Image (cartoon, rainbow, N blue to C red):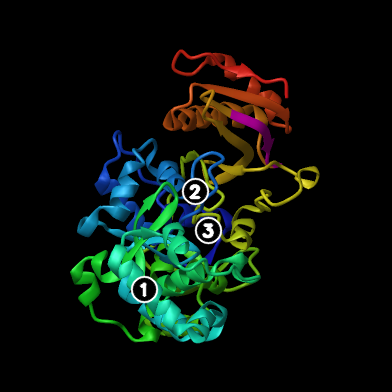
């Protein structure tokens, strides 16, 4: 990119989309290598348990690569010493590349000694150190093992009123996980199966030099800068959930070193920082649905700044107060978020339900509807669903319903009366 000091909102969007992998041609048959390259580009894939449509961690690869075998993600995270992802608290609970492990050791150390935000988590280690060690030895002896089995064998330890009502066994396991002493070896369904970290991660990663805290934080912010392309300091901070005092100090060092370039974006009231290797494509031809926890949109203030798209997930909002629906996904068309659509997978009847669809004010519903319908068909096919049912809620729903009779792979498609 030719060096610039000021960017338009459209240019900022295109830089962000390019950095996130939306400008590459989709492979005809996504393979493990494509997934590995993508996860290294993103740096973090948030894990979430909600399974209304598809679990959130499966979605980013689908949104960028197209229909892929989700078993590739399981292999990447849990295939013994050949794994190239591991679980840790990065943005939230996340998959991150194994080579990032040394960069997280400072966070593990803070969690272990209970400094800062980790004080509550580490209270179990201060209050019951022998019990915590007993839980660790149980993982050593029986791992990989789930929390449920350990809780059942932990003398029926009482559940506390804090930390989501966790039992002492669960609190101890979470403390050990944050401290890096145990990690997720695999999962059974969505339940973590814990084992000792040294029995899970590749030896080369475990033996890698541990950088100083400031160096590790600076490298994490560099990863965030590459993944975001163009970002404010709070954007960079949020990607790996750093503390403001840490991210501000590291950013000043990065500017001085030329790792990021200070720039301005028209309409932004905060300074912006450009990854020197970022690309500004002339156009973006994306057409995909995004998980609520996709790294493109998981920082809601950034999403609103880039697209004027006020986005909140409404799962925990009482139904009568929901504006757009229970599990709403943004629809990316070109370089804009053109619509939002409430989705649910009815797996028993093999139907993709679309209770509501809303178009954004800048977009033409007649142009958006066929593109969204095509994206919904792609989604349904990937999930193994055979029909799409369009509900009546939302200003885009009638336009979208007009395209349903085209069918999907010869299967019947209908509009619901709901």
Quote the CA–CA distance across marks 1 and 3.
48 Å
The answer to whether any part of residue 229 appears in the image is no
Q: Is residue 203 left or right of residue 385?
A: left
Labelled disc at residue 136: 1
Q: CB under 8 Å between callouts 2 and 1?
A: no
Region of the chain picked out in magenta, as a range: 353-361
Which residue is painted at 46% across and 30% down in the image? 378
Q: CB under 8 Å between callouts 1 and 3?
A: no
Give the farthest residue toward the right.
320
Q: Which of marks 2 and 3 is nearer the N terminus?
A: 3
Circle 1: element type: helix
Q: Marks 2 and 3: which is nearer the front?
A: 2
Labelled disc at residue 56: 2
Which residue is painted at 33% across and 73% down in the image? 137
Quadrant of res 244: bottom right
Labelled disc at residue 12: 3
x%, y% of residue 416?
A: 67, 20
């Amino acid at each position: 990119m030719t060096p610039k000091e000021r960017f338009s909102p459209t240019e900022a969007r295109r830089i962000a989309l390019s950095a996130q992998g939306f400008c590459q041609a989709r492979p005809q048959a996504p393979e493990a290598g494509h997934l590995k390259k993508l996860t290294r580009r993103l740096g973090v894939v948030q894990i979430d348990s909600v399974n209304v449509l598809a679990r959130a961690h499966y979605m980013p690869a689908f949104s960028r690569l197209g229909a892929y075998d989700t078993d590739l993600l399981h292999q990447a995270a849990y295939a013994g010493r050949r794994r190239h992802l591991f679980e840790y608290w990065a943005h939230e609970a996340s998959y991150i590349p194994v080579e990032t492990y040394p960069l997280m050791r400072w966070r593990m150390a803070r969690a272990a000694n209970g400094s800062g935000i980790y004080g509550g988590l580490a209270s179990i280690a201060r209050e019951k150190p022998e019990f915590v060690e007993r839980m660790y030895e149980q993982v050593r002896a029986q791992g990989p093992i789930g929390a449920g089995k350990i809780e059942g064998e932990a003398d029926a330890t009482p559940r506390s009123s804090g930390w989501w009502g966790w039992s002492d066994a669960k609190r101890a396991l979470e403390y050990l996980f944050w401290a890096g002493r145990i990690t997720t070896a695999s999962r059974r369904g969505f339940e973590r199966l814990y084992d000792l970290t040294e029995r899970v991660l590749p030896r080369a990663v475990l033996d890698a030099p541990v950088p100083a805290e400031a160096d590790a934080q600076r490298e994490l912010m560099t990863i965030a800068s590459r993944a975001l392309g163009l970002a404010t300091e709070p954007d960079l901070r949020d990607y790996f959930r750093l503390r403001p005092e840490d991210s501000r100090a590291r950013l000043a060092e990065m500017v001085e070193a030329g790792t990021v370039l200070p720039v301005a974006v028209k309409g932004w009231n905060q300074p912006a920082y450009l990854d020197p290797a970022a690309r500004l494509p002339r156009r973006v031809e994306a057409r995909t649905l995004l998980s609520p926890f996709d790294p493109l949109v998981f920082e809601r203030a950034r999403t609103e700044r880039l697209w004027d798209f006020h986005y909140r997930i409404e799962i925990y909002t009482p139904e009568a107060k929901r504006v757009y629906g229970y599990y709403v996904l943004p629809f990316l068309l070109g370089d804009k978020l053109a619509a939002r659509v409430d989705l649910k997978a009815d797996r028993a009847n093999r139907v993709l339900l679309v209770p509501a669809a809303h178009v954004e004010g800048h977009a033409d519903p007649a142009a958006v509807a066929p593109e969204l319908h095509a994206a919904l068909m792609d989604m349904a096919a990937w999930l193994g669903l055979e029909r799409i049912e369009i509900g009546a809620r939302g200003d885009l729903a009638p336009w979208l319903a007009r395209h349903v009779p085209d069918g999907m792979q010869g299967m019947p498609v209908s509009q619901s009366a709901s």
